[in-house]
Amino acid sequence: MSMISYPLRVFFDCSTAHLSEASSTYLNVHADQGDELVAATPYGWFIWVGEGDRDNLPADLVGITEYARRLRAEYILFDRDAPEDEALARFLGRTDALSGSRRARPGGE
């Protein structure tokens, strides 16, 4: 019996408490526009950690993506229930105000 070999990809499970309001807005806008690199989930977002243009990213999102790359992650799952990472800034009060993507908030899809 032969085993099928699948490529495994690493993702960084990151709390939404590490995202600024500007970053959550950025992720919602790109998910709503159908950007193939950003997907909204009921509790946050799933993004690709590429080497592309970072000029338009909010500073905190740049820092998180660079941190994820240092961890050798190819993707980030921003999740409101993920553990917070002491190496990253925390935006106080964001866990209550930010339940994740627009889909997770009242009045969302």
Image (cartoon, rainbow, N blue to C red):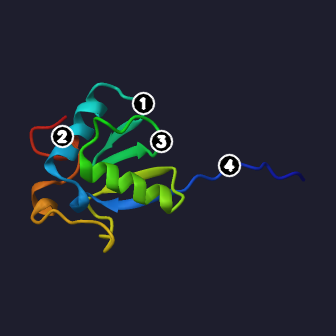
The residue lying at 28 percent from left, 64 percent from top is 81
Q: Residue 36 carries which label?
A: 1
Image quarter of residue 103: top left
Q: Which quarter of the figure is the C terminus placed in?
A: top left
Image quarter of residue 27: top left
Q: What residue type is labelled 1?
A: Glu
The foreground one among 48 and 62 is 62
Q: Which amino acid does label 3 sit on?
A: Gly
Residue lying farthest to the right in this orientation: 1
Q: Indicate whether 101 appears above or below 19.
A: above
Viewer-side label of 3, 1: 3
The residue lying at 18 percent from left, 52 percent from top is 20
The tag earlier along the polypeptide, 3 or 2, is 2
Q: Is mark 1 on a helix, strand or loop?
A: loop
Q: How far apart are marks 4 and 3 (CA)?
A: 18 Å
Viewer-side label of 3, 2: 3
Q: How far apart are marks 3 and 2 (CA)?
A: 19 Å
The tag earlier along the polypeptide, 2 or 4, is 4
Residue assigned mark 4:
7
Q: Position of residue 16 (x, y in %)?
A: 25, 57
Q: Indicate whether 40 appears above or below 98.
A: above
The tag earlier along the polypeptide, 1 or 4, is 4
Q: Residue 45 carries which label?
A: none
Q: Distance between the residues labelled 2 and 4?
A: 32 Å
Residue assigned mark 2:
25
Q: Distance between the residues labelled 1 and 4?
A: 20 Å
